[in-house]
Amino acid sequence: MKFCSAAEAAELIPDGATVMVDGSGGGVNEPTAVLEAVENRFLSEGAPRSLSVYHVSGMGSGNGDGIDRFAHPGMTTRVVGGHWAWSRRMQEMAADNLVEAYCLPQGTLSHLLREAAGHRPGVISRVGINTFVDPRISGGRLNAAAVDPINEIISLAGKEWIFTPVIPIDVAIIRGTTADEHGNVTMEGEGLLAEILAAAQAAKNNGGVVIAQVRNQVPFGGINPQSVQVPGVLIDAVVVDPTQRLSHATSQDPYLEGRERLQQITIDPMPLSVRKVIARRAAAELHSGDVVNLGFGMPDGVAAVLAEEGRSEDVVFTVEQGHVGGVPAGGTDFGLARNAESSINAGAQFDWYDGGGIDTAVLSFAEVDADGNVNVSRFGRRAPGIGGFVNISQGTHRVVFVGTFIAKGDFQLDGSGTIGLPATGKPKFVRKVEQISFSGKNAIETGQEVYFVSERAVFKLGLDGPVLIEVAPGVDLEQDVLSQMGFTPAIAPDLRPMDSALFRTEPMNLTLPPHDPQLLKVQA
């Protein structure tokens, strides 16, 4: 049974199976037709039931697609995922304890598939130590229904490590671009390689089933063997969907697919806004020659700032999904890149990240506490999870966290070099974060450089927590900063104003200091 309909492929999933779905957020590499067929089968037949769902990256668009296809009581009993933000219905089920909900670092989940394929016991890593992933804190649990431990602390070579045992995969649902008559799959029309090969190997070596969705079918011999990303011997069923899109936002794009290169990538300058002020200040922490990762959301403004300042070529952008070089895409196409110099599988990218391959990361913060801990992963009933955040933030030498100082408020910017601030808002600098996504303790112990950049104040992590080093011009230190924090930070003796150029309409003439080749990497 190689080529079949999506409905026929859905029949291959038994009750109680552990189903691995490969892909990324925003519909990137999402096997949409197969997932829809699986959901339709359950709604009409009540099967498959009692599934465990495994996904490395976030999947879906928040509109009932992606992993939300499995978000029905009785259909799914357990979810282990790296990122939940795109799966609103599944988040609701987790909040109501209708599924056992777990979240582990994206890199750990990616590496687990390789370990499962090779019949090795699991992943040993320091990624997640002293965060909610640590079994001494929450062990990656997102709700009370998640009772069983899925990782443990072990001692090895004089250090503590998190050991995460493999999760046997019964069914892998993957996506490529073209399949020949033997089921060999290529990915020339996809935006990233993800974990497609490791997922197929993990399922097949566990005696499981591999279902591949593709856009095109060609005769045997019509594919260059070196273009094959998953050999047909690993695949049980192929579903051809000629309407398959690159992502939910984009039908096809040869530049995002890596088939063509743009002579010049044009990024429109950002209008003057609080987001631009923060992105400018974050960009000022980069060094010429840095290998950089930009997180989802506000951090992608750094790329626009560098383009406006004529500094795009000064750094090398990378994306955790596997791209090196080029310019990362933003919005719901996050994870893709234009003019990437190389695109490798996500597991290999996380090997590099975990070992200290990134010089500087710019990531969002939602909460920062008195110990320098950061929360991006849990807020009451909402549990968007962490994705690659823990791998990236823990493995980089320098991390710049960005966000507005308060959660709500209207800001006024007239281009004069100052900022008008809302009188009050919900504090984001709090006594204790709701969940630890980044450990200030780890950063201090490893000598990591950590900055917290907002529109009105900049902090640097010191030995006892965040230290206030800059305030915006015209800001009242007590009224606009200290009184709106949940803790009293140390204040640098040389406290200085933020550069007024950050708040002006015209370019700020940014220059980046040279990269230090002797810079020691943080050892995750």
Image (cartoon, rainbow, N blue to C red):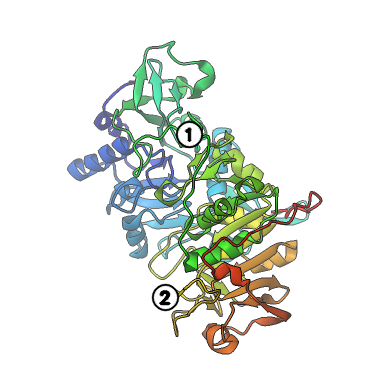
Camera-side residue of 410 and 73? 410
Choose top left, top right, bottom left or bottom right for residue 211. Answer: top left
Q: Which mark is residue 408?
A: 2
Residue drawn at 33 percent across, 35 percent down: 13
Foreground residue among 385 and 187: 187
The correct choice, above or below, for 90 with respect to 43 in the image is below
Mark 1 Cα-neighbour bin, 10 Å: few <14, some 14–19, many ≥20: many
Q: Quadrant of residue 93?
A: bottom left
> At 40% from the left edge and 49% from the top edge, which residue is drawn?
332
Q: Rounded to the nearest whole Å, what is the CA distance between mark 1 and mark 2? A: 40 Å
**In this view, 268 is above or below 460:** above
**As rendered, which of 52 and 108 lies closer to the eye?**
108
State the image coordinates of residue 402 (x, y, percent, origin top left). Answer: 55, 65
How packed is label 2: few (under 14 Cα within 10 Å), some, or many (20 or more)? few
Asked if residue 319 is positioned above or below residue 262 in the image, the reply reads below
Q: Where is residue 128 in the image (x, y as percent from the top left)?
A: 60, 58
- Secondary-structure class at tag 1: helix
- Under mark 1, the amino acid is Ile
Q: How many labels does the image show?
A: 2
Residue assigned mark 1: 196
| Residue 93 image label | none
Q: Is mark 2 on a helix, strand or loop?
A: loop
Task: Indicate the position of residue 100 as horizontal and vertical percent values.
Answer: 40, 57
Residue beneath the point at 49% across and 60% down = 298
